[in-house]
Image (tube, helix red, strand yellow):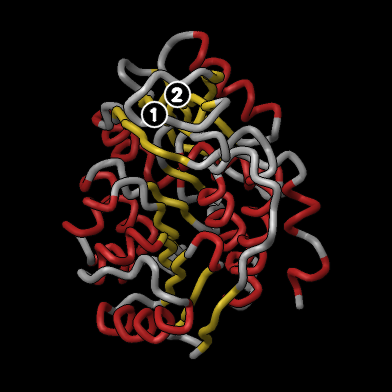
Amino acid sequence: MLVVGAVFVDVKGFSSGTYLPEGTNVGDVQVSAGGVCRNVVENLARMGFRATFLSMVDDNAMGQDVRDGLNALGVDTTHVFTCEKGMGMWLAILDEHGDLRGSISRQPDFKAMERYIEENGESLMEGCDGVVLGYDTNSAITAKMLQLADRHNVPVYGVVGNMGVILRHPEYLRRSACFICNENEAGRLFNQPVEGMSPEALLPLLVQESRNMGIPAMVITMGPEGSVYVDHRTGEFGRCPARAVNMVDSTGAGDAFFTGVVAALNQNMPLAAAVLAGTRLAARTLEFAGACCPDAREIFFGEDVKE
């Protein structure tokens, strides 16, 4: 699979005691490479899939570490190039339970990636059987990648990095093989509050709204309530319960869920089995300090994924 998106430097602060939003919190601060698409391509590699990454890094030690780390996992980083302001930064605060309490994101400059795709787009699609596309780049990159995917008859799975992009370009969702988002993002897309709804109440709303918007397939994650899903191409819909975990770090779980679902769909699994695969991978990721699960291959290929 070809993964197209940004690399971020993740700065995460963990509170060791009860988190006080307006006070000083003692804890730990960790710096690591991140970004939704970087996390996805690492997860794919750890699951044993061939993955190519198109992205940018800064010309410094962190940028080199990103490439070296992905290379060690078997990711093709031929199209990861250096440029000024090539990496973004994400600042996150997590409470004593590992739950995200706030974040600030600084985007990289995507002009260099835009030029790179114009010059190398056709060769990027050679041998590609699926594209994971970060919708938080810019409209020119998204439009060009969708055009290339259409021409080569390759499915596209869009990653929500910035919901504002989706709201400005809802037509992107009609081209996505499956759109995956959380409750907050679904509420913004449907223009009505959905957080706090039960899965039984949200599922018919999902079926109706996604059909009206022309979205072929869609999944909404609901935290401890699991997820609901629909595939209008097959008529499949339902709910997948969450799994009980001992949570260490909540960051990266959504990226793991996305990766599991997309990897399974690209293996021609039905959506119900794909959502189960994503649920398993996300649950395991929650139990690790970091954005990716080290034993992703074992989790993904577990026997009950195929039930």
Sort mark 1 into few (<14), some (14-19) or many (20+) by Cα contacts within 10 Å.
some
Residue that carries the numbered disc 2 in the rendered image:
9
Kind of residue indicated by mark 2: Val
**Residue at (58% x, 37% y) in the render:** 291
Q: SS class of the residue under badge 2?
A: strand
Observer-nearest of 118 and 188: 188
Q: Is residue 12 above or below residue 127?
A: above
- Disc 2 from disc 1: Cα separation: 6 Å
Q: SS class of the residue under badge 1?
A: strand
Q: Residue furthest top?
A: 60
Q: Are marks 2 and 1 in contact (CB under 8 Å)?
A: yes
Observer-nearest of 25 and 93: 25
Q: Which mark is residue 90?
A: 1
**Residue at (54% x, 68% y) in the render:** 225
**Residue at (49% x, 17% y) in the render:** 63
Q: Is residue 33 above or below residue 52?
A: above
